[in-house]
Image (cartoon, rainbow, N blue to C red):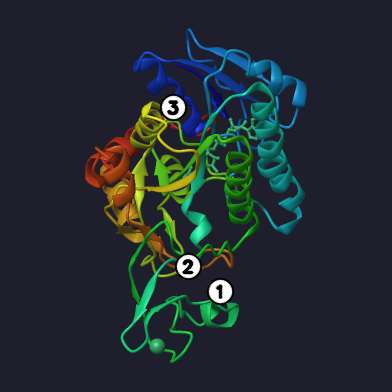
């Protein structure tokens, strides 16, 4: 299968490219090599065609789609960004980019899309109140966060909530610009699938980590901040009280999930979302400690700082993808963190 991998020079995309090639497919990369993602553009994967171009450029995309059977759409601006002024760039890259890509796919008759989705579409995740059952807490107030009240409370009675596992049919509740653009990508993909009879699958990745992860920019993930601090000889600094629950999934597991989705028989048209996580929730504090120990660096420091757009807990059930596509993560937290502590990160992180 010839597969166009947008964002194929990125952290996840480049591993998807390798996994596709390893499974005997023919990946083609389209990547704009954004300066926010790459201080130095990475070398192309040997033997794989790489087109330097933007998914918002109709002509470039139309040319890149020639002879392609499916598109694996990883290109996006990622992370929380600096502040709200980044919004036009996020919307342009992620949503205009997806719209241009889908239009070109419709014109070229490419029937199949796998989208790099994200758990950020769920917002604060899923909680139960001892009194009121399943509830959806609203955004956390700055005043409460400043006072160290990190856990969301029941919107009806104010009780402490128990975090649970989010399933794909949980209501969407994006809490920042990036999350909003990731949700809009899914809606665009669903609209495309409906009108063209194509099939679109969004793999809602959880916190992806692993070799080649970008250095600590405002656009990177928490594992990268910790790892970068350790390589500078500093302790990882953990926000809030370190009790934030996440699902950390290894980049090679995510790459395999993409291959598995592309190889699955195309039984149905339309849009489907799959949570793509390890199924093994851990706290951010546990991750910092595991990395510091494996690296042989100083113990993490818990700072009580917070970022307004962050959610407290988000852990998913990845049962649907296991049941329907037969994928499950193969790399455990302990094994993955040991490897990540020593892995090379994307330059120019000093290691
Ligand atoms: N890293 C995570 O934990 C995580 C979690 C959930 C979802 N995702 C999604 O996975 C995908 C890949 O993320 P990543 O972590 O590998 O990020 P990354 O920044 O390493 O890779 C993204 C790549 O896309 C390219 N790109 C961005 N905009 C482009 C455009 N308009 N045209 C062409 N290329 C463009 C960049 O140059 C970069 O190489 C993104 O869609 C992201 O939203 C990532
Ligand atoms: Zn309640």
Is residue 295 in sight in this rendering?
no
Residue 124, numbered label = 2
Q: State the image coordinates of residue 328 (x, y, percent, origin top left).
A: 27, 41
Q: Which mark is residue 139?
A: 1
**Percent of width and height locating residue 19:** 38, 23
Q: In this rendered view, identify the residue nearer to me: 122 or 226.
A: 122
Is residue 30 visible in the rendered image? The answer is yes
Which residue ends up furthest to the top in the rendered image? Answer: 47
Residue at 44% x, 58% y: name it. 237
Image location (x, y in percent) of residue 327: 29, 38
Q: Residues within 10 Å of mark 1 (few under 14, many from 20)?
A: some
* Secondary element type, mark 1: loop
Q: Secondary structure at mark 3?
A: helix
Considering only vertical position in the picture, is 347 above or below 202?
above
**Residue visible at 33% across and 53% down?**
287
Tell me the residue at 65%/56% (across/down). 177
Few, some or many residues within 10 Å of mark 2 (<14, 14–19, 20+):
many
């Amino acid at each position: 299968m010839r597969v166009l991998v947008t964002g194929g020079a990125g952290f996840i995309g480049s591993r998807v490219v390798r996994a596709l090639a390893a499974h005997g497919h023919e990946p083609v990369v389209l990547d704009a090599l954004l300066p926010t993602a790459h201080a130095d553009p990475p070398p192309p994967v040997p033997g794989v065609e790489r087109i330097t171009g933007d998914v918002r450029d109709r002509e470039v995309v139309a040319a890149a789609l020639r002879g392609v059977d499916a598109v694996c759409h990883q290109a996006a601006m990622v992370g929380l960004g600096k502040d709200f002024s980044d919004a036009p760039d996020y919307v342009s890259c992620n949503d205009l980019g997806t719209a241009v890509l889908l239009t070109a796919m419709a014109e070229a008759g490419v029937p199949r899309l796998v989208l790099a989705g994200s758990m950020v579409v769920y917002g604060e995740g899923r909680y139960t109140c001892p009194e009121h059952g399943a509830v959806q807490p609203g955004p956390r107030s700055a005043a409460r966060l400043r006072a160290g009240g990190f856990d969301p409370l029941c919107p009806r009675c104010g009780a402490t909530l128990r975090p649970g596992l989010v399933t794909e049919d949980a209501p969407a509740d994006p809490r920042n610009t990036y999350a909003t653009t990731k949700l809009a990508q899914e809606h665009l993909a669903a609209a495309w699938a409906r009108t063209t009879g194509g099939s679109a699958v969004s793999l809602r990745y959880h916190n992806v980590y692993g070799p080649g992860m970008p250095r600590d920019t405002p656009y990177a993930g928490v594992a990268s901040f910790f790892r970068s601090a350790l390589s500078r000889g500093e302790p990882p600094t953990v926000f809030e009280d370190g009790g934030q629950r996440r699902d950390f999934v290894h980049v090679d597991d995510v790459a395999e999930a993409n291959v598995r989705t592309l190889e699955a028989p195309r039984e149905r048209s339309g849009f489907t979302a799959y949570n793509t996580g390890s199924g093994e929730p851990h706290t951010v504090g546990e991750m910092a400690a595991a990395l510091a120990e494996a690296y042989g660096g100083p113990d993490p420091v818990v700072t009580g700082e917070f970022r307004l757009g962050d959610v407290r807990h988000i852990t998913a059930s990845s049962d649907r993808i296991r049941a329907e596509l037969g994928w499950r993560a193969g790399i455990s937290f302990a094994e993955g963190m040991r490897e990540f502590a020593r892995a090379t990160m994307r330059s120019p992180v000093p290691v």
